[in-house]
Amino acid sequence: MIPKISTLSGYLHEYQKSLANPVGFWSNIAETFYWRKPWTKTLEWDFKDPKVTWFKDGKLNITENIFERHLFLRGNQTALIWEPNNPDEAHRSYTYRELYEEVNKFAGVLRSLGVQKGDRVAIYLPMIPELAIAMLACARIGAIHSIVFAGFSAKALAERNNDAQAKILITADGGYRGNKIIPLKETSDEALQMSQSIEKVIVVKRTGQDVNMDKKRDVWWHDLMKNAPQKAPAEIMDAEDTLFILYTSGSTGKPKGVLHTTGGYMVYAAYTFKNVFQYRPNDIYFCAADIGWITGHSYIIYGPLLEGATTIMFEGIPTYPQPDRYWQIIEKHQVNQFYTSPTAIRALLAQGETWVDKYEMNSLRVLGTVGEPINEEAWHWYHDHVGKGRCPIVDTWWQTETGGIMISPLAGIIPTKPAYATLPLPGIRPVIVDNDGNKIYGKNVEGNLCIEFPWPGMARSLWGNHERYKQAYFSTFPGLYFTGDGVKRDEDGYYRILGRIDDVINVSGHRLGTAEIENALNEHPLVAESAVVGMPHPIKGQGIYAYVVAPDKPDNLDDELRNSLVKAVAKLISPIAKPDQIQFVSGLPKTRSGKIMRRILRKIVEGSTDFGDTSTLTNPEIVEELTEGYRKLNIDDK
Ligand code: WTA
């Protein structure tokens, strides 16, 4: 069994142990798993190259650790509860044995289609059980899954499939989301016109809508499963073989295929799940994220199932059909741990207390949040109205690249403080550095958040581009992993995450690169240039503010052009990337080397006029135009 910390002094002791002897610390944890062959060396690392190897030469399959390891004791225990979009439709449950059987069958299907170890399989599915089955089936046969959030556009899907050179695409006819139906097959067909590597498309029937099926290329999931073999032996994987890639936005244009490997990710996802949420046998755990993001990978599927937990996956949205859907699910399934995002909390808070107060939710023991800084008002509301003052909140800071939670309270063990992620997990060594890379020690300090020592769950590379991995994470501050976040350490040594300090914005907990959105805007024939920054937003945390230079735009067409730009971004990236406000400007503030001075653009949308030194601008007069324009558009006209 994975060691579980149960007291504050236990935490301090484990933390010290992990500093003094990281190799001993992590091998003790790793030994609780089922390895086909033990590792020869626990850790080799170099943050310069960078190259990190955990559990060298160890052989395993992560699905044997989910299934074979648990079947004897937990074969009849519920592994997965699926709760549909519409509460009138019945929920579905799978025991460990039933899920094991489905995964085996689909693994056999993939093999029969010629999928081999190391091949990439793209998954573009709504939140239905087949998504969980498909990803685990990939892991069973050593195929690398690349899950693309079902809200992404055809172009975004094609771009990811092309980068990964995916061989198979798994999608559905459509997906339900609130009162909308998302035409996933239609979008997939459009994406397939822009990509060459996909040989077969497997289509799950969910909505039953009419779809085009290409006889040579497209096959129904249910037809394949009818004749599937019952057993698919697990592929024996090296600890450092790739388990999956997951695309995320960076500060430059193209999404990055964050690459996670098998052994280290497994150990880290399971260890952090058990300790942060203080999961106990037979608890019902509900993470409301989407499996299209890392939170769903690590804390709906891998972490909980590795621990033998019962995990809920929810197809819908918190406000459909009414803004009490989460509370209903919690009551219905007697949920013990609930994990969601600050954006969802703020949106539900705005609906008023009555929706939540009518539910008792006595089963709840732990509440979690992730994805963006949580403001104090939302924290207190979550604590008082959802947790009824009884449940500790774990504000978990981590990233797609970290694989699992890095800084967070352990529920009920580390005293919480609103808006603070509190202390690092055992094995995690955060450091704060100034802009010159000097470490800042002591209390009440602020700076760039870096990690100075490897941990098993860290990403090992970016798919097909190790150089970019080095550039993005290990070159800003040589010798350190740079997170891209700003952080403060207070008088208790507690960490508070201040948000991104690079050109990434965090909209409703979704990471979006400003460059990606600018590229989409710039494709419009009337747009010469654009700059996108994050602006404070009461629900989404950050909204998207775009400054657009469109010199040939007819004067009376501002609103038309705004509409068509918003549509273009939704089409080229996703509706989640739509600008909240577009300001037309005659130019952007630029330095002599032609760089846009984004600091000024950010200050304007924060309502500040303290621009600092603007003497290096070639066009300092533009600042007044932008500030005036901002006021007119956002304050005077409102
Ligand atoms: C932000 C999500 C404040 C942060 C798991 C990070 C947070 C980015 C928190 C990663 C938190 C995540 N408090 N900010 N508890 N958790 N973030 O890759 O800026 O989608 O760098 O991973 O979200 O987003 P990603």
Image (cartoon, rainbow, N blue to C red):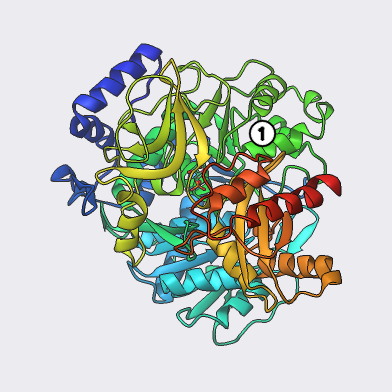
- Where does residue 502 sit, x and y in percent of width and height? 48, 49
Q: Is residue 552 visible?
A: yes
Left or right relative to 428: residue 289:
right
- Element carrying mark 1: helix
Count of picture labels: 1
Left or right relative to 239: residue 514:
right
> Mark 1 = which residue?
333
* Mark 1 CB lies closer than 8 A to ligand 1: no
80 or 123: nearer the viewer? 123
- Where does residue 110 sit, x and y in percent of width and height? 44, 70
- Where does residue 7 sit, x and y in percent of width and height? 40, 14
Q: In percent of the image, x 22 and y 32: which residue is there?
A: 22
Furthest-bottom residue in view?
Answer: 216
Q: Toward which corner of the image does residue 466 lie, by quadrant?
A: bottom left
Q: Residues within 10 Å of mark 1 (few under 14, many from 20)?
A: some
Q: In percent of the image, x 47 and y 62: which residue is there?
A: 592
- Where does residue 439 sit, x and y in percent of width and height? 30, 32
Q: Where 198 sits versus 351, above or below?
A: below
Q: Is residue 105 visible?
A: no
Q: Where 517 sits versus 401, above or below?
A: below
Left or right relative to 127: residue 270:
left
589 or 578: nearer the viewer? 589
Q: Where 591 sits versus 12, above or below?
A: below
For the N terminus, which image quadrant?
A: top left
